[in-house]
Each structure stands twice: as C-alpha cells, then as structure tokens.
Image (spheres, rainbow, N blue to C red):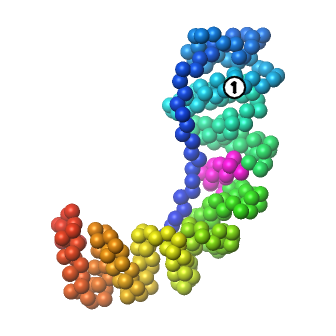
C-alpha cells in the first residue's frame, strides 16, 4: 500500500551565501616568526604562500579580516582550495573569529571533504551547543551520507532547544517520509500545526500522507486547509487527481472547470477535463473542450493527436 500520495521530500542541501566581491586589498607580510602579522607595505602579495602570518597570542583583527576578504573573493570566484587556505590563515590571526570558523565547514563541503566538515561542525557545536544554524547544517550532511539516525537526533535536539522553531520539524517529517515511516511523519506534522496552524507545507504534507494511507476525509480536510492558506493551481490539480482516484467525477469536473475559467490557456487542466468528460460518457462536452483548446493552443496539431 502506498504511504504517500505524491512524494515530496527534497531535503535541502547546504548553500553558500552570496556576498560582495572584494578587490584591491593588499598586505605584504614578513613571514619570519618575529615579524608582526599586520605589517603592511603598498605592494601586496601575489599569492597566499607569500603571505603567511606568524602565530600570535593576541587576536589581530586587521590581519584576520584581510585573509577573510581574500578567502571570500576566492570563494566567490570558485577557487575553494585557495579560500580554505585563506580562511585557515585568518584563524592564525584570530583563533576566536566566529564568522571564519563557521565558514570552514561550508568550504570543506564544496571540496567534497564531508568528514572534515562534520569534524569542524562537531567541534564548533561543542563550544556553541545552542547554535542551531550549524546544527541544521550538520543534520543535512548526515542526510547526504544516509546517516539518518544521526540526522534525526540533530533535528530533535534543535526542536528541544527552540520549541517554536518549525523548520527542523518539517525536515524531520520529510525524512520520516523518505524512510517510509508515515505514522511518525504524521505525528511530527501535527506538532508543527499545534505551534503554527497556518503552516502551508505542513498541511500539504499531511494531505499527501493521509491520501497515501487511504484516509480520504482527513486528506480532503488538509487539502482544503492548504488551499485556503495559499491558492495554488498545482495543488488544486493535485486535489482534482485525488478526486479522480476516488471516482468523485462531479467534484473533479467542478474543480477543473474552475481552473480553466480562471486560466483558459492552461492546456493541461483542459485535457484532464476532457478525460473526465469521457469517463462520464459525455462526449459532446469532451469534444467542445477539445475544440476550445485547439482554438487557444500554440500547437493545435498536438491537441488533435491527443
């Protein structure tokens, strides 16, 4: 038995923020241990290897920010090895620079070095256990690696730390759906709606889960609630298809006629309407709808062939 009407789980992959391009920043550094990492001259280094800061005890924000900008420019231009090297050198200048520490796992992911990304995130979370953004990224990496139990544990921890946050619950429900555990997904989605009754994705996912489980009335209730929150032609057509599965042809006709009256050039909806008329042995109405589609179609021949 199917457990989900229309599979809808596209777990989010980690993405990089788009920032400003950096240019014209130049520092030349004496790489001897006794030199100051922030010493500057007018002519800057041409490569990172010629500009390695010496380890220091006190944070040097000027030095750190210089390498951060270098790394950011390299990142934006797709030079991820160079970006990683620059960010690592920025941390030599300021080992507590949080905005740089959080960059490293993302660069490791770009370089397909997932294990190192996980190690960095776990180290960071040991020091910042309430940083749910980093924890969310860690969960998504675990999903990518099919370490689903570890991902579930991270989502659950995020929710315990911030009960009003629902994104982790939505992702957790999709993870349960992908693992064919519809009952657990339903439980999680009901938790979402307890906190956020106007959560459109929660209503849509519940509608599909109930449809897959054969709970027709519950599915229809959730479809209607979702459509009340967000009028969506795509979701209306999904509901229309559900009506067809249930052989509720009258409801399906009314819904598809509503769609084509609002969107007369929606050929897909029109063709479904033709199909329903044929199922009802209403050939005249089917032919009339076909003629209407031919008159508005960019490719009338396709309508004829259909």
Magenta stretch contains residue 95: no
Q: Is residue 85 visible?
A: no
Which image quadrant: the C terminus? bottom left
The quadrant in which residue 39 appears is top right
Magenta: main secondary structure: helix
Alpha-carbon neighbours of circle 1 within 10 Å: few (<14), some, or many (≥20)?
many
- In the picture, measured across the screen, residue 103 lies left or right of residue 222, that is right
Residue 125 position, x and y percent, is 76, 45
Q: Residue at x 57, y 53 (%)?
A: 12
Residue beneath disc 1: 64
Q: Residue at x 21, y 86 (%)?
A: 284
Return the residue nearer the eye: 212 or 159.
159
Residue 100 position, x and y percent, is 68, 34
Residue 56 position, x and y percent, is 79, 20
Magenta stretch contains residue 142: yes
Q: Residue at x 27, y 89 (%)?
A: 281
């Amino acid at each position: 038995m199917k457990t989900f009407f229309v599979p809808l789980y596209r777990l989010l992959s980690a993405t990089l923020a788009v920032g400003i391009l950096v240019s014209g920043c130049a520092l030349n550094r004496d790489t001897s241990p006794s030199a100051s990492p922030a010493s500057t001259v007018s002519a800057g280094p041409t490569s990172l290897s010629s500009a390695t800061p010496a380890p220091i005890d006190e944070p040097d924000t000027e030095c750190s920010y210089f390498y951060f900008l270098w790394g950011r420019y390299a990142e934006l231009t797709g030079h991820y090895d160079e970006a990683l090297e620059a960010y690592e050198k920025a941390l030599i200048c300021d080992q507590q620079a949080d905005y740089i520490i959080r960059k490293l796992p993302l660069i490791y992911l770009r370089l397909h070095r997932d294990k190192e990304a996980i190690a960095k995130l776990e180290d960071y979370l040991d020091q910042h256990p309430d940083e749910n953004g980093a924890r969310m990224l860690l969960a998504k990496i675990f999903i990518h690696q099919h370490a689903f139990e570890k991902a579930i544990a991270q989502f659950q921890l995020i929710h315990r730390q911030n009960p009003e946050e629902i994104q982790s619950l939505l992702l957790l429900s999709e993870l349960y759906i992908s693992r064919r555990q519809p009952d657990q997904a339903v439980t999680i989605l009901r938790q979402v709606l307890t906190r956020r009754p106007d959560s459109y994705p929660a209503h849509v996912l519940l509608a599909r889960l109930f449809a897959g489980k054969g709970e027709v009335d519950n599915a229809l209730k959730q479809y209607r609630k979702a459509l009340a929150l967000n009028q969506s032609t795509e979701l209306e057509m999904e509901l229309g298809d559900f009506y067809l599965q249930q052989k509720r042809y009258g409801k399906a006709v009314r819904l598809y006629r509503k769609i084509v009256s609002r969107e007369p050039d929606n050929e897909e909806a029109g063709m479904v309407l033709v199909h329903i008329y044929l199922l009802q042995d209403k050939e005249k109405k089917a032919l009339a709808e076909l003629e209407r589609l031919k008159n508005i179609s960019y490719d009338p021949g396709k309508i004829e062939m259909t």
